[in-house]
Amino acid sequence: MANITISAPLANGAISGTNTDRLALALKVFSGETLTAFDRMSVTSGKFTERNIQSGKSAQFPAFGRTKAHYLKAGNSLDDKRENINSGERTILIDGLLTADALVFDLDEFIAHYDFRTPYSNQIGEALAIAVDASVLAEVAKEALNTKENVAGLGVGGVVQETLATGGALGINKATGVAVRDLLLQIKAKMSKNYVPKVDRYAFVSPDIHSALSSNLDFLNSQYGAHASLGDSDIINMDGFQIIECPHLTAGGDDNTNVMQGDGHIFPDAYASKEPILVCQRTSVGIVKLRDLAFEQARRPEYQADQLIAKLSIGVGGLRPESTFMGIINNPTA
């Protein structure tokens, strides 16, 4: 029988029958789809302080206090006026290797039928995004509960509570929308007193809280003069905050059996069931990246399957308690 040439689509328009060549294009497309899914799902990407390291297991994030200005009289020395600027640092350790993968049977069918590939690529990217978000937001919550100043004089955050009007109930309703806005105004004032920068302020909320605000923007504008707008389906801009919906707000990261140190970024249990609102500024949490999002594809002949892998290596930790708050809406007692 004569040999049969099998043509397969490849990068750069080439045609070849080798497994390496046939995988080249599929890997590039898979990587792009996974990266797109990661960016689409993540609510914390690009919103916090990040550092990239080439090697090692940790990175230092410096923190500086404030000083005062003084008038200088003729003949006096600046040495007599100068005040010390206190400083400190936080060290964030790498958690380990965060991975998500899938085994896809029948490689030739996978390459030929792209509708089979996309769901796997999307699920892998979304799984990593949710895991990173959950770890970051758990650290935001823990930093809000931190009662120790990073540098003396900078202040701390804390838990701010607001009670619904009598007869109200927490849910997708006007009373909840009003209470959330009042709570945000309290936190805004506390942030300003701590000299937290006015840019890059965020409030991460559950879908119910987000919907309560979305459904009441007209009411808030007419009754309270709120500077609020609904930019898209996920983000509300109100009173200097980007209010971001996050269904995995209190999910927390992986347990401590799978990380190199710490508790795996577990969300504080005492607040997980209270519909918390996490309010912070970009400097509240630090992320150190040893390896950014990377991809692998390997043939598993013992399973007659192709293994798709996405991975990254990061560490997450609190940085600035003075810029981090947690809001809680309480049901009325009467």
Image (spheres, rainbow, N blue to C red):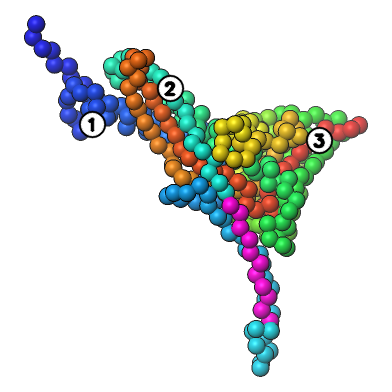
- Badge 3: few (under 14), some or many (20 or more) residues near its Cα, within 10 Å? some
Residue 149 percent across, percent down from the top left: 72, 56
Labels 3 and 1: the sequence-earlier one: 1
Instruction: Find residue 121 and report its horizontal and vertical position in percent.
Output: 41, 26
Quadrant in which the N terminus appears: top left
Magenta segment includes 89: yes
Horizontal side, residue 298 vs residue 146: left or right? left
**Residue 287 located left or right of residue 206:** left
User: Which numbered marker is on residue 330?
Assistant: 3
Amino acid beneath label 3: Asn
Magenta span: 81-91
Q: Which mark is residue 11?
A: 1
Q: Can you say which quadrant of the picture contains the C terminus?
A: top right
Q: Nearer the viewer, residue 178 or 59?
A: 59
Residue holding disc 2: 102
Q: Is residue 318 above or below residue 151?
A: above
- What amino acid type should be assigned to the residue bearing mark 2? Ala
> Disc 2 or 3, which lies upstream in sequence?
2
Whether the residues at callouts 2 and 3 have beta carbons within 8 Å, the answer is: no
- Whether residue 80 is situated above or below residue 179 in the rendered picture: below
- Mark in front: 3 vs 1: 1
Q: Secondary structure at mark 3?
A: strand
